Amino acid sequence: MTSIRFVGDLPLWLGLLLAVVASALSWRYYRREQHDLSPRLRWLLPLLRSFAFFLAVLALAGPVLHHRTIIGELGRVLIYLDGSQSMAATDEHMSVARKLLVVQQQGWLSKGDMDVRSWELAEELAAVREETVQTLQGELLNAETWEDCRNSFVERLEAVQVQWRHLAGNWDDHREPAEESVGEESNDVRQRFETVILEPARKIDIPQPAPQGDAEDAEEIGIEDSRELLQLCQKLLTFESVLRRDFEAMVNQVVATDESVRLALARFDATPRWRRGESGLLRDEQGVVNQLKKTHDVQILTLDEETANSKWDGRQGTDFPQELLEQASGSLTNLASGVSAATIRRGTKETGVADAETGQRTAVILVSDGQHNSGPSPLQIAKLLGQQGIPIYPIGMGSRLEPPDLAILDLQYPDVVFQKDDIRGEMTIRDRIPRGRPFVIEVRHQDEVLWRKELVTQDTLRRRVEFEFPVEELVERLQQQFDSEMKQHTVPLALEASIVPLDEENEVANNSAMMRLAAITQSYRILVIDGRSRWETRYLRNAFQRDSQWKIETLIVGPGTDDLTLPRGETEGTFPTDRERLFAYDLIVFGEVVPDVFADHELVWIREFVELRGGGLLLLDGQRNVLSSYPENFTALFPISWNGDVIQVLPDRLRLTERGANEAAFRLAVDKAENRILWNELPPPHKLSCVDALPDAEVLLEITVNDEIRPAMVMRAFGAGRVLYSAFDETWRWRYKVADTYHQRFWNQLAKTIMARPFAVSDEFAALDTGAASYSHGEMADIRVRLTGLDGRPATGVTVDALLWKDGQIISTVSLDPDGIVDGIYRGRTGALEQGEYEVSIQASGYSQEVLKARTQFVVEPPETGELQQTACNEELLRSMAASSGGQFLSEEQFTKVVSLLRPLSSGEVVESDTLLWQSYWWFAAILGLLATEWMLRKRAGLL
């Protein structure tokens, strides 16, 4: 196959541009000649001269004919370079010995006379150990495979022993303190290798399978039969470490005395994994690709999240690439979907290659750190490729150990808070820094620090840190930035939790995470209805009246009160006469009111208030058990049923359930352990209604009575709202000696949990809400609009659309449908959302855009992949992929070894040669021929 290439000083595009410009100028100049010529010559003469100029200038681009001849049958090699973010990590924490081996492989340092045999022997011991353990723990182990495994174990270790005996060095005093002596005492670790490992391995008898049983299972051997050999594999670790320490000691001496070595190691520390992988593939004649392409069909691809992008194919005749990636930026690692493309053989329609080579032997090289976190299992793909005879040769990039790192793994916090409440939550961090180093965690809004805590590292995989801080002043400042013509009921807060980076950290991109929530600014309306003026009702009313965020109305009605019948009307202190006014409340506290005071339709309204409007209902039971006397259509709301038991003794103590401990409403102390202790110490009630929680309800608080556990507070969702039942009415006792410290805080938090979320923003005619302050990638946002007319009544029969904005452009229009139950409410849902910041406005028939000013915002977070949570090389996965496909795993320092492993794959070779057109007589002859032809035509026309 012959192709044309351009290898001159000028790139092809610039050479073509200059050639076209030169030929155009030449054409224009010679066309100006006013001789009396025929029309044909007036075109032909300038064309010949212009084409000669074109060829002369194009020679600066260096045109070359590249000839590629295949002799025999080539093997096919697909090389995949992982382009995920974890491959952008550096490996300063890798052992100096491994670094030195890698820089030698990369050609950054001459190999010189350094003896690497001790390291190679340690790697061989590790390979023997891992392969033996894998075989012995396999599913299909019988006497024959067991014997082959034992024999291979002994033979390979005997080969190691022979090489070790010829290895110079001090091999004394390497005994581990805990190791038992076997046989005669010896200070030579090589002799102990014989007595501790080889002699016992030779003496292990082949397990005898049970003579009876199923024919298929008769020869199977279990783990117990392999215990001795597995124990020897474990003991090999001691001898591996001896050999590695010897090599590392030699390396440290070299580093201390050789400046070029130190510079090469510094270059390694500054080079990310993907760049080292790219260099190992593409560098000069010693690079893997340059060696393989002489005898194989080579194609290079990069793994970009879930796809594999071809960067170079040796059969296409394109120029050899200088680089493969600009940056490793993939937000996830999928080692399955992209690599599975190797199953598509050349010569099929999918590949677009005309010549079929269906019999071509294929292998895969995977350059990756093995941090697979998305898509199907790569082991399944490896098995599939192995069944098709396509082995995978993974090259593990990076250190086997996790780098020193602090990272925020998770954040738990409420989606909504009251403006005057504190934000309470918990962050989970990874702390992989040696113990004793101080560090700082902060929560910020832009440059303002809202919370800060100093900690000391503990070198642990996961630790939890709880936080609590106020946001009232911040919300007040943010409110001043909004349009004065809109009423902001909730203020979106974008806070950043971060760990101040330490110098020794390897990766700082995972030190921060965003917290997106909404702070509610409007006053809430609560309706309290009780049948008597209990202490609980009084303190509850006083607690909410002292807080400006709450607007509370209390009705005490029934026998023994001032109002024997329910006062109804449209003024304060009356029960609403229509359902819409009742629906204007956010929470109803329902006490021991006799059923007779309500009309049937009023109980239906209360039920619909929860089920349809999404309001909250708090049921306060008492000693009279009045709530149990309500009709079944109303008690269907209740999350409990009465069991008829009667408690004659005083309850012992309160106790949070696991569900209650995780509920923000029951968080009275920041620390979870302290919170549980606090609840245990709160004064228990003297009376308790005996109930059972319904199957779909959740018990949040329990009471122990004579070591018997009974439900105290039970909650469940009912329709669009929530109902909480309290089996006692004595939380006022919690004020003893501590006043409102716990009592008011609990009721504020509980009310927030039960109530429906308010609209985020409103103007004169419309209220708009888009749910959460943030959504995950791919989620859909629910849009809710309340529309009123000029008379203030709900607007019906209106066509309402929500406009979805991103980057200042309308990207979608969402049609909103009438609620069907609540007049004036319109609902809709967006499609699946991509990450980014969004804004929502509305348009409605009969309303101008000037009057519908309400706008709200939300953010769609990028997909969470955990790409940077683990950055150590996952050798276990890569080894398993190699074993499942019939390939072999190679560590980074063995990069070029893959060339020798793939040599048997090909029985042919590629012969390549170049013809330098721009230096050839043919190119010069073409230019002279054009000029000579022009000269002859001019002479015949009498122009010379």
Image: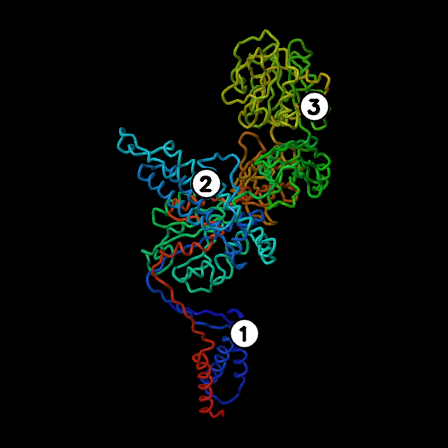
Residue bearing mark 2: 192
Residue at screen point 48% across, 77% down: 55
Residue 784 on image: x %, y %? 58, 36
Pick whichever of labels 2 and 1 is earlier in the sequence.
1
Residue at screen point 56% across, 8% down: 646
Q: Nearer the viewer, residue 863 or 64?
A: 64
Coloured how? Answer: rainbow
Quadrant in the picture for the N terminus: bottom left
Residue 825 on image: x %, y %? 58, 33
Judged from the image, the secondary structure of the residue bearing numbered disc 1 is helix
Is residue 497 shown left or right of residue 61?
A: right
- Residue at the limit of the structure toward the front, as seen here: 184
What amino acid is labelled 3 in the image? Phe
On screen, residue 130 above or below 101:
above
Residue 627 visible somewhere in the drawing: yes
Is residue 590 shown left or right of residue 354?
A: right
Q: Nearer the viewer, residue 162 or 405?
A: 162
Residue 911 on image: x %, y %? 38, 67
CB contact under 8 Å: marks 2 and 1:
no
- Which of discs 2 and 3 lies nearer the camera? The answer is 2
Q: Nearer the viewer, residue 568 or 861?
A: 861
Disc 2 to disc 3, how far (Cα)? 79 Å
Pick whichever of labels 2 and 3 is earlier in the sequence.
2
Disc 2 to disc 1, how far (Cα)? 76 Å
Residue bearing mark 1: 18
Residue bearing mark 3: 544
What amino acid is labelled 2 in the image? Arg
- Which of discs 2 and 1 lies nearer the camera? The answer is 2
Q: Nearer the viewer, residue 732 or 668?
A: 668
Judged from the image, the secondary structure of the residue bearing numbered disc 3 is helix
Residue 581 visible somewhere in the drawing: no
